[in-house]
Amino acid sequence: MTKKELIMAAIAAMAIIIGVTGYFYWKKQSASVQPAVPGQTLTETASQGVLPSINANPLQNAPDLNPVNKANPYTNVKTNPF
C-alpha cells in the first residue's frame, strides 16, 4: 500500500466509526424522548411545567379608560331633525 492509500483507508475507517457512533447516539436519544399523551394538544404538552395556567381573562375587571365615552356632556339632548 502506498502512503496515499493508507491515508484514504484511515479516513474511511474514521468516517465509518463516526457514523456508527452517531447512529447509536441518535437511537439512544430518540428512545429517551417520551411520546405525547393522546388527547393533549401540542401547546399543552410543550408548555407543561413552563407557563402558569390561565383560567380567567386578566382584563375582565379592567377600568374604562376610553375618553371618547366621556367627551360629550350633552348625551341626553334631543337633536333637531330639521
Image (spheres, rainbow, N blue to C red):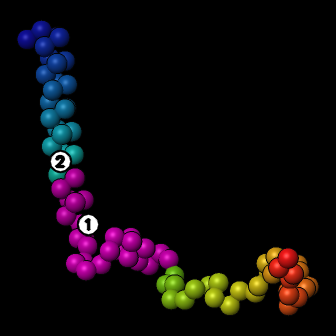
Query: In the picture, which quadrant includes the C terminus?
Result: bottom right
Magenta residue check for 45: yes
4 up-or-down from 58: above or below: above
Circle 1 or circle 2, nearest the eye: 1
Of labels 1 and 2, earlier in sequence is: 2
Local crowd size for mark 2, using a 10 Å CA cut-off: few (<14), some (14–19), many (≥20): few
- Residue 23: mark: 2
| 49 relative to 27 in the view: left or right | right
Residue 75 shows which numbered tag? Answer: none
Nearer to the camera, 21 or 10:
21
Amino acid bearing label 2? Tyr
Residue 61 occupies quadrant: bottom right
Q: Residue at x 82, y 76 (%)?
A: 68
Q: Which residue is drawn at 24% across and 66% down?
A: 32
Q: Is residue 12 left or right of residue 37?
A: left
Dot 2 lies on which element?
helix
The single residue placed furthest to the left in the displayed view is 1
Residue furthest to the top: 2
- Say above or below: 50 vs 30: below
For label 1, the residue is 33
For numbered disc 1, what is the local secondary structure? loop
Task: Report the magenta residues as a range.
Answer: 26-51
Tell me, yes or no, whether the highlighted magenta stretch contains residue 43.
yes
Image position of 76 with respect to 80: above or below: below
Q: Residue furthest front?
A: 82
For the residues marked 1 and 2, what is the alpha-carbon distance in whole angstroms? Answer: 16 Å
The picture places residue 13, in percent across and down from the top left corner, at 14, 30
Say whether residue 37 is visible. yes
Q: Which of 5 and 67 is in front in this view?
A: 67
Q: Is residue 67 visible?
A: no
